[in-house]
Each structure stands twice: as C-alpha cells, then as structure tokens.
Amino acid sequence: MNISSIVIQTLPKHVEEVVESLKKSGVCDYHMHDEKGRIIITIEGNGVQEELKKLKVIESIPYVITADMQMSYSEEELSSHMEVLKNADAVPKVLNDKTIDVSNMVYNGDLKKKDLEGFAKTFDNTGK
C-alpha cells in the first residue's frame, strides 16, 4: 500500500470549484486549502502505477494548474529498510576499527556537512 500527499495549485477564484471536484472524484481524500489556491490531498494505491493513474485524474480536473506529489509512504519499501536496519550492526564498523587513527576523524554534528570523500581518501592514502 502506498500513500502520497499532493499539493495542488489553482487560482484563488477557482479553489472552491476545484475542491468540490476533488471531493467528487473518488480518487483522493481532501484535507485543506488556503486563500492562495493551494490544496492538500492524499491518494492511496496498491503501487506507484495506481497512484500515477489517480494523479492523472487529478491533473485533468478543470482549473488545476499543478498537482505535485510531496511525500510518499510505501509499506513495502519501509519493510525492506526495516529488515536492513534490523540486520545491521548497531555501531558502524569504522568506529570499532583499531587500525584507524581517530585523530584523523572530524565530526561536524551532521553527516550532510561532512566531507566523506575527503575522509575516505585520507584512509586510502595511509593504507588503512
């Protein structure tokens, strides 16, 4: 089962009409809208293909300017990730490797900011 949220944009003067069309479409659940013409809905499907078919229906509703998936949840995908995590070591092997000089390690508090390539090159050059 997949569940995805979709943000729809329409002109403010058409928002009520689009909301009513969405509610009658049978392909989504309406949640909210604002005065700027943004509408939040969710769709469900047995897979991505079913969700894409529903998205096409939504895009074809009169006065819908855009309809973009923002978030998606897949039970199958979650199950596979949970299996990987369940079988993974609680502590990364590099942290238990006694051959690595810890003075070369730099923690920035966020892996997105960490230069992982530079980190790997440091150990490749030292032969460790």
Image (tube, rainbow, N blue to C red):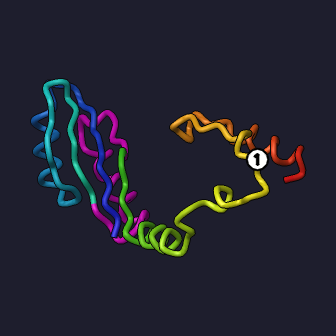
Q: Is residue 58 magenta?
A: yes
At a point 76% along the width and 47% down the height, the residue shown is: 101
Considering depth in this image, is 122 or 40 the residue closer to the camera?
122
Q: Who's the residue at 74% across and 58% down the image?
A: 98
Where is residue 35? Give x, y as percent: 13, 25
Q: Is residue 58 above or below residue 112?
A: below
Q: Nearer the viewer, residue 84 or 20?
A: 84
Give the quarter of the image for residue 47.
bottom left
Q: Is residue 62 magenta?
A: yes
In front: 113, or 29?
Answer: 113
Mark 1 surroundings: few (<14), some (14-19) or many (≥20) residues within 10 A: few
Left or right: 62 as drawn, with respect to 111: left
How many numbered marks, from 0 up? 1
Q: Is residue 62 above or below residue 34?
A: below
- The image position of residue 118, as x and y in percent, is 76, 37
Task: Tell me if 65 is positioned left or right of 31 in this view.
Answer: right
**Residue found 24% across the figure and 31% down from its top:** 10
Residue occupied by mark 1: 101
What secondary structure is found at the residue carrying circle 1? loop
Give, as a single range, the part of the protein colored magenta.
Answer: 44-69
